[in-house]
Structure formats: C-alpha cells, structure tokens
Image: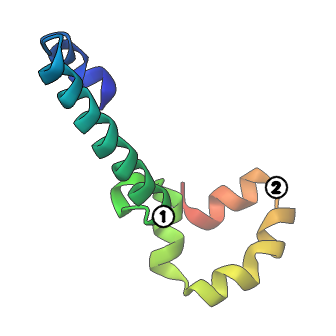
Amino acid sequence: MFFWSAPFLALIPNGEVGSAIWGYIGVVGAVSGLIIAIWTPRWAKPRWQQYLEDTYSKAEIRRYIPVWRVMDAKQWSNLLDT
C-alpha cells in the first residue's frame, strides 16, 4: 500500500496541516497493521492455507501438524494439490 500511495504522499504540504496528515497516516497504518497481525483476512492467506482451513477443522490441523512436518515437499504438495 505504501508504494501505491507514495506519489500522493509527495503532494502533502509542509507545516501543521502536513504534520496532521502524516500523523493520521501513521496512526491508521499502525492500527491496520495490528488488526491484520491479529486477525488475518482470508485474502491475505496463501492458497494452501485456505485449502487446509476449508478441508480440516482447527483440531484436525493441530493433530496432523507433526505428521505433515516429516513429509517431504513432494508428498505435501500432492496432498494439497498445489
């Protein structure tokens, strides 16, 4: 988002108004970052994770993690069809 908004950030005036705008951008960015860190939206997750969450319950995922960790990459990708 920063790179998309960078051209517009150059248009922010200097002085009190500019400082207020920068403060607002900083607060909104920090709050957005915390929200995404705590609650990850579906669109921000990789496809394989979405597949696991759609296919298995959270309890099953926790139970299978030790088994999946010892699988080689080919087995894992065949399991997830990715």
Residue 75 location (% of width, % of height): 74, 60
Residue drawn at point x = 34 percent, y = 50 percent? 32
Query: On screen, 2 above or below 37?
Result: above
10 Å crowding of disc 1: few (<14), some (14-19), many (20+): few
Q: Return the x and y of residue 20 as percentages of the image width and height.
A: 19, 30
Q: Can you identify the residue that label 1 sits on?
A: 38
Q: Which residue is mark 2?
A: 72
30 vs 77, left or right, is left
Q: Secondary structure at mark 1?
A: helix
In the image, what residue type sits under mark 1? Ile
Q: Residue at x 18, y 10 (%)?
A: 14
Relative to residue 38, is residue 18 drawn left or right?
left
Q: Is residue 2 shown above or below 53?
A: above
Colour scheme in use: rainbow
Query: For the point 74% across and 80% down, which residue is it?
Result: 64
Q: Quadrant of residue 5?
A: top left
Task: Kindly report which numbered mark, 2 or 1, lies closer to the viewer in this rendering.
Answer: 1
Looking at the rendered structure, the secondary structure element under dot 2 is loop
Q: Position of residue 49 (x, y in %)?
A: 52, 63
Task: Find out whether the residues at labels 2 and 1 contact each other: C-beta distance under 8 Å.
Answer: no
Which of disc 1 and disc 2 is earlier in sequence?
1
Q: Label 2 neighbourhood size at 10 Å, few (<14), some (14-19), many (20+)?
A: few
Residue nearest the viewer, comparing 16 with 3: 16
Q: Quadrant of the N terminus?
A: top left
Name the residue rendered at 64%, 56% in the picture.
77
- As drawn, 11 above or below 65: above
